[in-house]
Image (cartoon, rainbow, N blue to C red):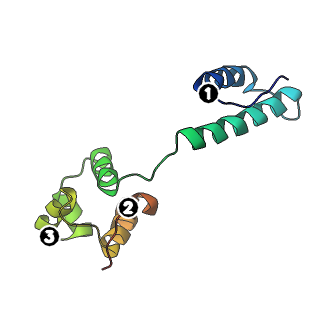
């Protein structure tokens, strides 16, 4: 096992290449230990250099609409009248906490995706 810190994207590429060869290693083996260390190093490098940000709430709603074949009219039960739905989707009106709760419960959109930029209701 010859493991070193990941300091560049090239190091990351090489770590992934090595990880592919030990990924299916049996638990308790030296290769499994190497796999676990490589995963920790890769995660640390990626979280520092490629952080993930919460999904944009409107994009999360549009994504769910596309997944489920929903129209703006279908969102009225969660957001309110058609004018309000249109304002929310065009970013002219922020989501309220009440809307977030209804969207989460009704469409199973994660709270984390909906809570960015929420106004008090």
* Residue nearest the observer in this picture, 100 or 74: 100
Q: Position of residue 29 (x, y in %)?
A: 88, 30
Q: Residue at x 68, y 30 (%)?
A: 6
Residue reaching furthest to the bottom: 121
Q: Name the disc covering residue 109, or none.
A: none
Q: Position of residue 46 (x, y in %)?
A: 59, 38
> Which mark's residue is nearer the viewer, 3 or 1?
1
33 up-or-down from 56: above or below: above
* Residue nearest the observer in this picture, 5 or 107: 5
Instruction: Please tell me whether mark 2 sits on a helix, a strand or a loop.
Output: helix
Q: Residue at x 72, y 19 (%)?
A: 21
Instruction: Please tell me whether mark 1 sits on a helix, a strand or a loop.
Output: loop
Q: Which residue is mark 3?
A: 81
Image side of residue 52 versus residue 77, left or right:
right
Quarter of the figure that contains the C terminus: bottom left
Q: Position of residue 109 (x, y in %)?
A: 39, 58
Instruction: Please tell me whether mark 3 sits on a helix, a strand or a loop.
Output: loop
Q: Marks 2 and 3: in contact by CB < 8 Å?
A: no
Disc 1 crowd rating (10 Å Cα; few below 14, some 14-19, many 20+) is few
Q: Which residue is mark 2?
A: 114
* Residue nearest the observer in this picture, 83 or 10: 10
In terms of image quadrants, where is residue 90?
bottom left
Image side of residue 40 versus residue 81, left or right:
right
Q: Name the disc covering residue 8, or none.
A: 1
Q: Can residue 13 be seen here?
A: yes
77 up-or-down from 74: above or below: below
Q: Position of residue 39 (x, y in %)?
A: 70, 35
Disc 2 crowd rating (10 Å Cα; few below 14, some 14-19, many 20+) is many
> Which mark's residue is nearer the viewer, 2 or 1?
1
Quarter of the figure that contains the N terminus: top right
| CA distance for labels 3 and 1 | 51 Å
């Amino acid at each position: 096992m010859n493991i070193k810190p990941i300091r560049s994207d090239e190091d990351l590429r090489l770590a992934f290449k090595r990880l592919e060869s030990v990924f299916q290693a049996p638990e308790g083996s030296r290769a499994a230990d190497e796999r676990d260390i490589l995963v920790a190093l890769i995660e640390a490098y990626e979280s520092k250099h490629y952080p993930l940000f919460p999904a944009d709430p409107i994009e999360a709603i549009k994504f769910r609409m596309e997944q489920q074949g929903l129209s703006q009219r279908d969102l009225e039960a969660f957001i309110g009248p058609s004018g309000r739905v249109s304002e929310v989707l065009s970013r002219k009106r922020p989501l309220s906490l009440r809307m977030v709760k209804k969207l989460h419960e009704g469409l199973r959109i994660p709270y984390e995706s909906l809570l960015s930029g929420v106004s008090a209701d």
